[in-house]
Image (spheres, grey):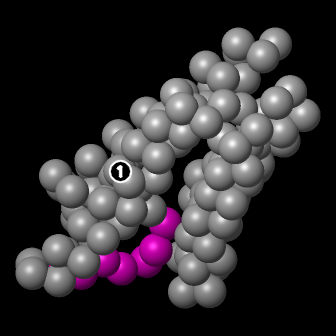
Amino acid sequence: MYTAIVVLAAVLGVAVIGMGAGYLLAPVTNAKGFGLPEWPEGTLAAWLNIKGIRDVGMGVAILVLLATAGPHVMGWYLLVSAIVPLGDWLIILRHKGSKAVAFSVHFSTAVVVAAVAAALLLLG
């Protein structure tokens, strides 16, 4: 059980890095699936790189903490990290974006991250 949770935490880290890389390499293309009704084009799309670098940094932090600090610290970090997809969920709902994407992508991500965090805290 412990190994499966640690592997799941590592998968979360790699997935977040992948999402961030997408926003750095093709921000407008990736942003269209985020859930908001409109996205900036042209030079304004560079603002989407902010999301990308945030995700890459968080993903790297997950992997580094997992490798160096152990499951208890990793659990706390993931629990705090669940704030980010919850914030994304609320932003989409506030700006009248896609409720389906808000719940199926962002809210469900927050739930999974919090569940993995809880498992790591209980096991660590």
Q: Is residue 28 among what the camera can see?
A: yes
Relative side of 83 to 43, left or right: right
Residue sitting at the far right: 122
Q: Inspect the image, locate mark 1, and give the three-letter code of the amino acid beneath it.
A: Val
Say if 109 sits above or below 42 in the image: above
Label 1: which secondary element: helix
Q: Position of residue 119 (x, y in %)?
A: 83, 33
| Stretch of the chain drawn in magenta | 35-41
What residue is at 70 percent from the left and 13 percent from the top? 3
Q: Which residue is mark 1?
A: 56
Between 121 and 8, which is closer to the camera in this rendering? 121
Say if 68 sits above or below 76 in the image: above
Relative side of 62 to 108, left or right: left
Quadrant of the rendered structure where residue 118 is? top right
Residue sitting at the far bottom: 95
Q: Is residue 119 among what the camera can see?
A: no
